[in-house]
Amino acid sequence: MGDDGNSAYGHRPFKRSGSHFGDRITADGRDGWPVEAGRYRLVVSRACPWASRAVISRRLLGLEEALSLAVTDPVQDDRSWRFTLDPDGRDPVLGIRFLSEAYDKRETGHPGGVSVPAVVDVPSGRLVTNDYQRITLDLATEWTALHRAGAPDLYPAGRRDEIDQVMAEVYEDVNNGVYRAGFATHQKEYEEACAGVFQRLELLGERLSRQRYLVGDTLTEADIRLFTTLVRFDAVYHGHFKCNRWKLTEHPVLWAYARDLFQTPGFGDTVDFDHIKRHYYQVHTGINPTGIVPLGPDLAGWLSPHGREELGGRPFGTGTPPGPVPPGERVAPRGRPA
């Protein structure tokens, strides 16, 4: 959150905090946290792109029963992410009002603020990890014994070097680039970040004009990481973060690619545009002091035909799509395209 809270956004130089709690939940439990069904709770905000990666991965891999999900209010206050969407304002499993309580149980006076995604150990109520870069990779590779039948291989061993390279470029210029542009405090800083965003998007568009997915002919972690930025682009990054050289809907290849993913089970059914818009426009008061949330954009286009099937590809490889969204995890109608 930063020392000055929400009002500091846009008034201080932007630097993304590292993940202070880097423990890993692994099959062999080498960090003291073994993979175990029902032991851990994944805490997310549907507004946050970094947390949305974990929500998508969990659903694609069929970990809904093994790893429970807590969804915070998209509008956090200066004390951290809140469980005000739940009865009595408490998470029904952890029994806490603020995610910061799980952080404090792990380490009092910890640096780096309170971030999502976060994985909490249910028996102790302590935070295990907030390493957003590692959590999804471990879900794909360490939690395999609990994957659903037909789960895709999101981080195939033979493709990892290429996936890592693509993800590094996407992270630097796109995932993090929109934030560096949006939170810039000087014109040059903003222009350099914004130019970097669109230069990388153009390169990604060229790549995706020849192939359906970023690496190989199946969905991988790289697609998840690009999608969570693209799905927010026109709704918040184009206007709120001033990344406005063009809209996603104005780029034929990237718009078709984003729609393809959105319409793939496990992607669009996790997206809540209402949470996304309310978080960015109401929390970042240093950028948007009125807190007014825009009515647009029109979401209907997300359900229009995309034509990407012509490029071939097998979304789930030799696997199958995930089943229906669990009833308690469905996105409310106001957050979805009609």
Image (cartoon, rainbow, N blue to C red):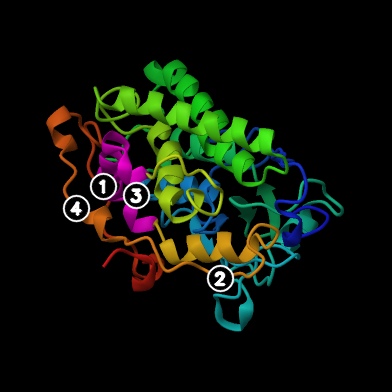
Q: Nearer the viewer, residue 333 or 265?
A: 333
Picture residue at 48% right of the left edge, 40% below the top: 139
Q: Residue furthest right?
A: 109
Whichever of callouts 3 and 2 sits on the residue coming sooner in the sequence is 3
Cβ atoms under marks 3 and 2 closer than 8 Å: no
Q: Is residue 88 above or below residue 312?
A: below
Mark 3 residue element: loop
Residue 152's tag is none
Contact check, label 4 and label 2, Cβ < 8 Å: no
Residue stretch rendered in magenta on the structure? 248-270
Amino acid type assigned to the residue bearing label 2 in the image? Ile
Instruction: Inspect the image, locate mark 3, and give the three-letter code of the amino acid beneath it.
Output: Phe
- Name the residue that disc number 1 marks: 264
Quarter of image, res 14 = top right
> Label 4 belongs to which residue?
304
Looking at the rendered structure, which numbered label has been put on residue 292?
A: 2
Query: How far is the residue under mark 3 from the one under mark 1?
Result: 6 Å
